[in-house]
Image (tube, helix red, strand yellow):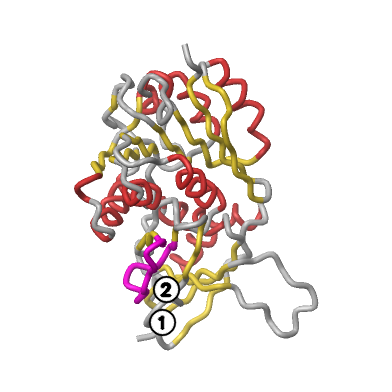
Amino acid sequence: MSWMELSLDTTNEGVDWVCTLLAKNNFTSDVHIQKYTVAENDEITPDWAFTISLYLPDDVYADIRGSEIAQLLSSLQRTGLATDLHMAVVAEKPAHTEELVKRIGQKFVVLSADMPYSSTAEEITLRLKPSLAFGSGLHPATILSLQLLERHITPEMNVLDLGSGSGILTVAIAKLGANVLALDNDIIAVQATQDAVSRNGVEQQVTVIEGSLGSGSDLGHWLGGDSINNVPTVEAKNQFHLIVANIPARIHIALAADYQKALLPTNINGGLVILAGFTVDYESDLAVAFTDAGFESVDCERQDEWVALAYRLKSA
């Protein structure tokens, strides 16, 4: 059987956006991610980090389906996050995606789902299968979130992962010894989080729910997907030591008051929010919103134009 191969090169942050846009189009076939290889005749080294390949049966619908996916991903090309989609007919698709190992912070090692790997006593492995949920571990916002979590999570904390996506942050928090409520308003993300929790053996510490915090249910699909209806709401009422949310800045700003209500009274290990999912362009707006909501800045991590911020509730 022959296949229609669709491939494009992306930046680090482009990987998750490709998967998110594919999810909107209900494309659930294999997603193959490989490190980008510079061609020998390239005089200028491009900024691409990965090559993503998709495979469709080479039948009468392949050209139409391929054109639909090309149109879907065209916005990434216009914004410089990816190349145009290249289409070719191949005799067979690869049996396996190249195994990627991503080291983050002092402890975390992100691996593909079934990759053989012998970890040291100091390492924390996070295993994920290819998913159409945001949070592959390759996006700078995910990396920055993990770096802050590594510093601020302590055992026995009650933590909310708001917008859990692929489940990578939920698993990391649980493996650091905390208890986690993972919330997402997208059913694909909920399923991906549940898979990641099971795959990493942290079921006893994690509850996964389709839903949102406080007024978050009124804000539609946070990543611009199809409209969502009747998403359950988790009431904000002093139940978490820490909230982490890798979501767009406008959602953080809209939920600042809900974050404040959902956190337990401040103490040495509590009253903390870790905010990610945005570039430095939004940093000042977030500072105003969270200062007004009774928070003070305590930590941050930066990578290129991306930033993750930690705010703590001010003492009464």
Which residue is depicted at the point 32% across and 20% down? Answer: 238
Name the residue nearer the viewer: 143 or 87.
143
- 133 part of magenta stretch: no
Picture quarter with the N terminus? bottom left
Element type where label 2 sits in the image: strand
- The part of the chain drawn in magenta is 109-123
Above or below 200: residue 283: above
In the image, taking residue 32 as reference, residue 185 lies left or right, namely: left
Which residue is depicted at the point 48% across and 21% down? Answer: 313
Q: In the rendering, at what x and y percent does residue 8 appear?
A: 57, 68
Which quadrant holds residue 111? bottom left
Q: In the rendering, at what x and y percent does residue 6 appear?
A: 50, 72
Q: In the rendering, at what x and y percent does residue 256 appear?
A: 48, 23
Helix, strand or loop: magenta stretch: loop
Tag 2: residue type? Tyr
Outermost residue on the left side: it is 204
Outermost residue on the top side: it is 316
In the image, taking residue 120 as reference, residue 283 lies left or right, namely: right
Tag 1: residue type? Lys
Check if mark 2's residue and mark 1's residue have beta carbons within 8 Å. yes
Name the residue nearer the viewer: 193 or 240.
240
Which residue is depicted at the point 68% across and 36% down? Answer: 281
Which quadrant holds residue 109? bottom left
* Any part of residue 196 in sight: yes
Q: Residues within 10 Å of mark 1 (few under 14, many from 20)?
A: some
Q: Residues within 10 Å of mark 2 (few under 14, many from 20)?
A: many
**Residue ID for mark 1:** 93
- 116 part of magenta stretch: yes
Above or below 140: residue 29: below
**Residue ID for mark 2:** 55
Outermost residue on the bottom side: it is 91
